[in-house]
Amino acid sequence: MDKGKSKVIEREADKCENPPPRKEKGYGSSSRQSEVTANRTEQPVKTLMREVDDCEDDEMFYPELQEANNIFKAVYKEIMTIAFEANYYVEAVPALGSIEELQKVFRISPPSDWRLETTTETAIVPISARSLCMNMMNLDSWHASMSHIFHYVGGYIPDGVFKHLKDEDPSILHVEMVNAEFQLPTPFAAVRKFSFLRFLKEIIPDELWAIIDVSKDYFQHIDMDYMFEGKCRRRPSGVIIRARDDHSEIIWIENVEVPVLSQFQDNIYSAIINSDVAFSAKRWVDAFLWNLKRYQSAFFIQEIKWGRPYYLFLLSLTKNMRLDFMKCLRESPDDRDWTLLTDHGMRIMQDATMRSPEACKICGYISVVSFRIQAKPHLVFQYLVKKNRQLQWHLFLDEKEVLRFAADDESYLITLHQRSIITENSCGSEEYILQEASWDGFGYLIISAIMNQADVFCSLVAGYKDVDLKPSGFAIVPDGFDSSLVTFSLQEVLQVPDTHTGIRVKSCVAKRIISEIIEEMADVVKSAS
């Protein structure tokens, strides 16, 4: 940051720690009371009483506004301090009055059964600063840009003290109350639930902004949300954004308190869960860049006549496929979609939306299981990209790749393979497998679904959004240096006499496939060494 920018930030030191006086109401000042008295004979009695009540309400409301203002300043100063201590482009910490005692609250050690994760990352991202601010403050856009990390996100614009705080401080452009849940791609790791306030603050007009997050429990005057309980705590966190032409230079700060796993919760994901890697600032930056890369990908093979804008249809379809896949990996499955049959080491569920007459005994089943492979994640990924299609088609007879949409480095890749099949009712028809394979800097996803000709036409030519796909696939995350943790989800329709048989069949199939994968990967590792 140049000296001019530093001086602009430092000018915040001249601001008092109280909010600036209101222009309209004056917080019950003597001039306001005189005005009311002077007009007493001209105003109706009800209007006069309302004016007096407004003054009394202002006097009662002012301490809450003052407290919220001071806490917000302490939160803002804390994220600027973290960025400054990380030796990024913030060259000075703003002096904002006597708020040191409030700021110390953010440095208190967490309870013994909790731990603190504080990580930072800087990057230049190919999106304008204003667009990035809009993306972060619009919860739907924020969710869409990193949907494979979100379990849930919702929010609303708060009223009361926070509405007045925004009105009184012109540098606060927007305030949002956010409820969010973040997940790893496995049902064997608990989601992280946060309830926090998000502020958009303009630091230097048209040049520097900050997205500021902080858990709502730091503020005293917020009503409890009994529909959503944040189990984790978001200390001052956020993103500092500096405009660089049509790009943005960002400092991402993650600063959270999360529970420590007990020995009774121990599983193969414990090491990752108890580290700061899975939800670090770097992970969020990489995930955001991953989403931008999706939209910058291009067609390398294209043998189908498309509708327009065809690439948006394709990205929308694969996004929905990814969301459905991640729903199957939730810690607690949605009973509107799935009936949980067993969850002992391997999760097996029955599709609650697919019911057939009792005599047919046909129903959709899904198995979800996590396991470890002694191989580096990128080797596992390269092997499973092809294996995943093979598990659904079994034999690659007359297979043809009719679509290939990829990033330059193929860290994001969509393919559509076609083959001819012969059924009892037809001499021949086309069947397809749509597959999305990607790496977001932390983990890998390989997700695919079988499609028929009608599915392809409706979704990719006509652009219909209600095509019902049943995705299967793999999620791969690192486990140390030479090991990988893999979560495998397989959906299929079975015709079995009862659910007990369905459980047994799904369990046997999943175990056989895992053994096959581990054995074949051992050969891949030997060949690579």
Image (spheres, rainbow, N blue to C red):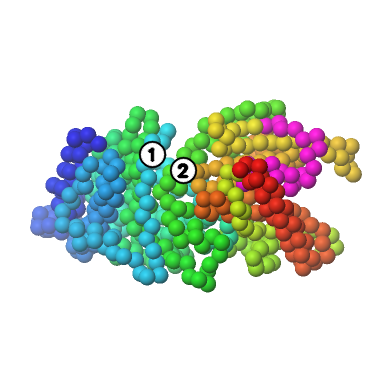
Q: Are discs 1 and 2 less than 8 Å apart at CB?
A: no
Nearer-the-camera pick, 35 or 415? 415
Residue located 66% across and 28% down the image: 301
* CA–CA distance in space, label 1 to label 2: 9 Å
Image: 86 above or below 273: above
Whether residue 261 is visible here, answered yes or no, is yes
Determine the image quadrant of residue 215: bottom left
- Of mark 1 and mark 2, the one earlier in the sequence is 1
Q: Give the residue drawn at x 57%, y 47%.
A: 377
Q: For mark 2, what is the residue?
A: 286
The x and y percentages for residue 95 are: 17, 49
* Number of the label disc, if any, that sits on residue 123: 1
Give the residue drawn at x 33%, y 31%.
244
From the top left corner, tell me how far across and down residue 286 is, in percent.
46, 43
Type of the residue with mark 1:
Ala
Q: Nearer the viewer, residue 166 or 513?
A: 513
Q: Residue at x 16, y 43 (%)?
A: 11
Check disc 2 and report its element: helix, strand or loop: helix
Q: Where does residue 129 sit, x and y in percent of width and height?
A: 36, 36
Quick check: 245 left or right of 505?
left
Picture layout, residue 409 above or below residue 10: above
In which quadrant is the C terminus drawn? top right
| Amino acid type of the residue tagged 2 in the rendering | Asp
Q: Which residues are magenta?
A: 380-403
Residue 73 percent across, percent down from the top left: 24, 53
Dot 2 alpha-carbon crowd within 10 angstroms: few under 14, some 14 to 19, many 20 or more: some
Whether residue 477 is visible to the viewer of this picture, yes or no, is no
Is residue 389 magenta-colored? Answer: yes
